[in-house]
Amino acid sequence: MKTVKVSGKTIEEAISNALKELETKEPEQIEYTVLEEPKSGFLGFIGAKPAILEASLKRDPIEEAEQFLLNVIDDMGVRVQVEKLKEGRETTFSLTGEDLGVMIGKRGKTLDSLQYLVNLVANRFADRHARIVLDAENYRQRRQEALEQLAERLAFKAARSGENVVLEPMTARERKIIHAALQRNDDVDTYSDGTEPRRYVVIAPKS
């Protein structure tokens, strides 16, 4: 990342010089540190000292997150490519390649962990919250559909047996899918129990 040291008679002039050096016209696109405050000196000019700033362009949070992910992929030695798609405030990093099974992991745990990390990296630099979804050949959609089918099947089992059905521990996102799938089911209620990271959904028959 390019960093420049600039000076000016005032802070404002030094910022203006920094914009020229960094080849941008938007002050909000740079960040700077004041190294020395300006001093007017005797009679306004004798011994005067300029303001000195150290400035750089602000890091793009999505680009930082993408570079982090590429570095992880390189360290893992897998053959995977990343395609980026931005829709509104959400950005999807879609993974393709020969080693997607390694990236997804058992029930998507590796994919979820990587998604958590890339969001941490992005939000270190974001002015407002950035949301990144990590997907691999539409795994997220396929997993959602599988969970919805599981929810319906276990809801039928709970209603028929009259006993609670306890699901295996899931991430908050997957628990939300189960709750949403059965929200309008007249035969059962759902609630989450346990403590993270082993929090789970309980499907209970309505009395």
Image (spheres, helix red, strand yellow):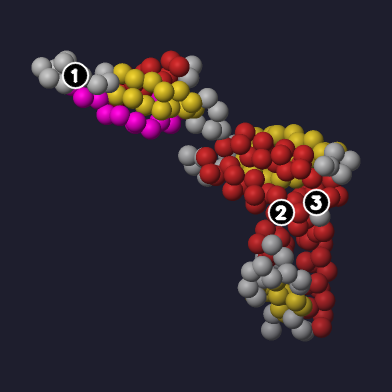
Name the kind of residue labelled 1 in the image. Gly
Residue 10 figure quarter: top left
- Disc sitting over residue 112 in the figure: 2
**Where's residue 116, x and y in %?**
65, 52
Q: Circle 1 sits in a helix, a strand or a loop, which is it?
A: loop
Q: Quadrant of the C terminus?
A: bottom right
Is residue 154 in view from this perspective? yes
Residue that extends furthest to the front in the rendered view of this protein: 47
Span shown in magenta: 27-40
In whole angstroms, how far apart are the C-alphas of marks 1 and 2? 60 Å
Residue that extends furthest to the left in the rendered view of this protein: 43
Task: Tell me whether the residue at label 1 lies in contact with that at label 2, contact meaning CB atoms closer than 8 angstroms.
Answer: no
Q: Nearer the viewer, mark 1 or mark 2?
A: 1
Q: Which residue is mark 1?
A: 47
Residue 3 falls within the magenta-colored stretch? no
Q: Which residue is mark 3?
A: 104
36 vs 94, left or right, is left
Q: Who is closer to the viewer here, 10 or 28?
A: 10
Name the kind of residue labelled 3 in the image. Ile
190 vs 161, left or right, is left
Residue 50 figure quarter: top left
Q: Nearer the viewer, mark 1 or mark 3?
A: 1
